[in-house]
Image (spheres, helix red, strand yellow):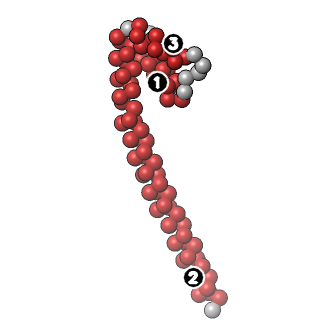
Amino acid sequence: MTKERKIQNAALYWHTCKKDGFPQGQEKVFQEWLDKDIAHSHAYETLHSSVPQTRKTEYQIKQTRTYFDKKYFLFVVLIFVVIFLFYIWIKQ
């Protein structure tokens, strides 16, 4: 594994820790890691700045799923209404 890849993996680990909450004492280790090398801070900032775009994409996917869920629900309700009306028509 190259040095650059190791730095990216570490940046991803620290980003996840910061998002989920640092374990006890890890915030100091994170700051030391950032200050150790300019490549570390650059990798972390690059990863950190790309996250809102990912969240936006996840939000758009969720909206699309919700739209299809509503559409599917309406289709099922329509089928039940048709079956119910057919049942009433047969009973007469």
Residue 9 position by quadrant: top left
Question: How many tags in the picture?
Answer: 3
**15 w.r.t. 4: above or below:** below
Q: Secondary structure at mark 1?
A: helix
**Residue drawn 45% across the image and 11% down it:** 33
Going by the numbered disc 2, the residue's amino acid type is Leu
For disc 3, the neighbor class at 10 Å (few under 14, some 14 to 19, many from 20) is few
Question: In front: 86, or 28?
Answer: 28
Residue 1, position in %: x, y? 44, 10
Q: Which residue is mark 3?
A: 29
User: Which dot, 3 or 1, sits closer to the camera?
Assistant: 3
Residue lying at the far bottom in this picture: please name it. Answer: 92
Residue 81 in the figure: left or right of residue 10: right
**Picture coordinates of residue 55 (x, y %)?**
41, 38
Point out the tag, 3 or 2, that comes first from the N-terminus. Answer: 3
Residue on which the image places disc 2: 85
Q: Amino acid at mark 1?
A: His
Front residue of this view, candidates 75 and 62: 62
Q: Residue at x 55, y 16 (%)?
A: 26
- Tell us which disc is closer to us: 2 or 1: 1
Q: CA distance from mark 2 to mark 1?
A: 57 Å
Camera-side mark, 3 or 2: 3
Name the foreground residue: 37 vs 72. Answer: 37
The percent coordinates of residue 92 (x first, y second) are: 63, 92
Q: Determine which residue is flagged by label 1.
A: 15
Q: Amino acid at mark 3?
A: Val
